[in-house]
Amino acid sequence: MQRFINNPDLVVEDTVKGFVKAHSDIVRLAENPRVIVAKDAPFAGKVGVVTGGGSGHEPAFIGYTGKNMLDAVAVGELFSSPTAKSFHDAIREANGGKGVVVLYGNYAGDNMNVKMATKLAAKDGIEIATVVANDDVCSAPPEEREKRRGVAGEIFMWKMGGAKAATGASLEEVRATAQKAIDNCRSIGVGLGPCTLPAVGHPNFQIEPGTMEVGIGHHGEPGVRVEKLKTAEEVAKDMVKIVLDDHNLPAGTEVAVLVSGLGATPLNELYILNDTIESEISARGLKIRKTWIGNYFTSLEMVGATLTVMALDDELKTLLDVETRCTIIL
Amino acid sequence: MSETAARALARMFERMSEAIETEKDHLSELDGAIGDGDHGITMSIGFKAVNAALAALDLDAASPSEVMSTAASGFLDAVGASTGPLYATGFRRAAQALAGRDRLDLAACRDMITAISEGIRDRGKAQRGDKTMFDVWLPAAEAATTALADGKSERDFWTAVTTAASNGAAATATMVATKGRAARLRERSLGQLDPGAVSANALIRAISNTL
């Protein structure tokens, strides 16, 4: 394996250590070494905003800890939910006395661990609300939307929830805004090459050279079809079509767009995709208010990209402009 | 029985950990086919944590129920994923089932296996045939109940339980996954054993070998 690691079993520990050293102006490590906390959190009188998930998606989840974003993040093993204890500790670290909202991704492990953690937190007397992201269009058909997984749309959910919490809003208001944000998001992933967990040593799924997996999940979950690799223009058209056919937005709607690499796709290719993505979205009569392009939510060294489109209303437009101070510029 | 019930349970968890260590690479390999290939590692971390937690317990003073609840917390605090909450809930239910008991007779063993099975079912919302560890724990619990009702000998009781568990694990190859990450594979999961079911089978064999 051509990888920068020390010990395959210590990848998460070593990642967290390096992360905290780099960003000590923005974050701190909790007593639980699997919990990252915004430097000055908790904030009295502000709703705490928490997430958590498996590692290997950096900068998600830890990189979104910071001012006007996430107050605390529970860190799991690679591609594996954090423990209930870590979610519980993250909730405690984020608690400023006004309740805590947990915004997470609808994976089996996360669902169970968050549920157990929120019960423990309730025993501490902390008021809790949760929002489950389900923006990945290809992870389940529209009639089973509650089964869909959360992917890069989670970033918008965190940003909107974090910005709302910063206004001093109540727990219910923050929950409702985060829920609206994720309801307004649709995402699609296209995979061109697999990824490898260092402790396993070989890819656990294959994408044959010359083909692509349309609708791939954040851990290599199969999508809706495998087909011959096409030009960036054709791929981008397909991505926009899948996302917007599911979204059904009226013409004139303003949207935010996020194009993220999955880990091993160069940035220039994301720009090539975006050239068509922008034209296709505009051709449908939608107005792009802001676009983010980069490695915002990765899957180790997977080759591929995701597209997320969030429909905006007046509240979300205002919150979109709230400045955040985390390790990633948003 | 010269050994206390609490000590027997602690030894059971040591055997479970050994069974997982033996199967570790095989479990990860099975998981590689329909998951992300870390089930062996996850289970190994969990049972090592259980034994570390039990090492801190005074087994001469502890009740069987306390051993189970210590195991539950040890597992939960060490393991995330789906496995952590599932086994922690199962062991916690077993602690409730063993409350007030100081003997591990066959009725207690039946109640313990049934409680683990029910805890896993309730936490994971699993049903028979979903291709999960529940497809091993449920038939094992059913076999224990039937064997006890039929007045089977201790030896036949455990033969019935381990046979049901091993048949349950083998049957997962004929099932389509509907839970967790493997569910995304749909019919592509056919023909593959469920790693959680295979590890459950190894655990039940370890229980049978100890008790």
Image (tube, rainbow, N blue to C red):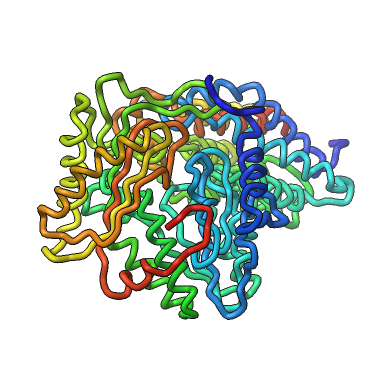
Image check: B38 left or right of A142?
right
Which residue is more in the foreground, A249 or A66?
A: A66
Residue at coordinates 87% horizontally, 48% vertically from top-left? B58
In the rendered picture of this protein, how many numbered marks are placed on residues?
A: 0
Residue at coordinates 55% horizontally, 42% vertically from top-left? B83
Residue A158 coordinates in the image, percent (x, y): 44, 61
Residue at coordinates 80% horizontally, 51% vertically from top-left? B63
Which residue is more in the foreground, A178 or B197?
A: A178
Which residue is more in the foreground, A136 or A317?
A: A317
Image check: B44 left or right of A299?
right
Image check: B52 left or right of A17?
right
Name the image quarter holding residue B177.
Answer: top left
In the depicted structure, whether residue B145 falls above or below residue A301 = below
Residue at coordinates 64% horizontally, 67% vertically from top-left? A40
In the depicted structure, whether residue B28 falls above or below residue A252 = above
Which residue is more in the foreground, A136 or B146?
A: A136
For residue B195, say whether it is visible. Answer: yes
Name the image quarter holding residue B105.
Answer: top right
Residue B4 coordinates in the image, percent (x, y): 84, 42
Image check: A47 left or right of A241?
right
Residue A299 coordinates in the image, percent (x, y): 44, 37
For residue B89, say whether it is visible. Answer: no
Residue B81 coordinates in the image, percent (x, y): 53, 44
In the depicted structure, whether residue B82 falls above or below residue A37 = above
* Quarter occupied by the C terminus of chain A: bottom left
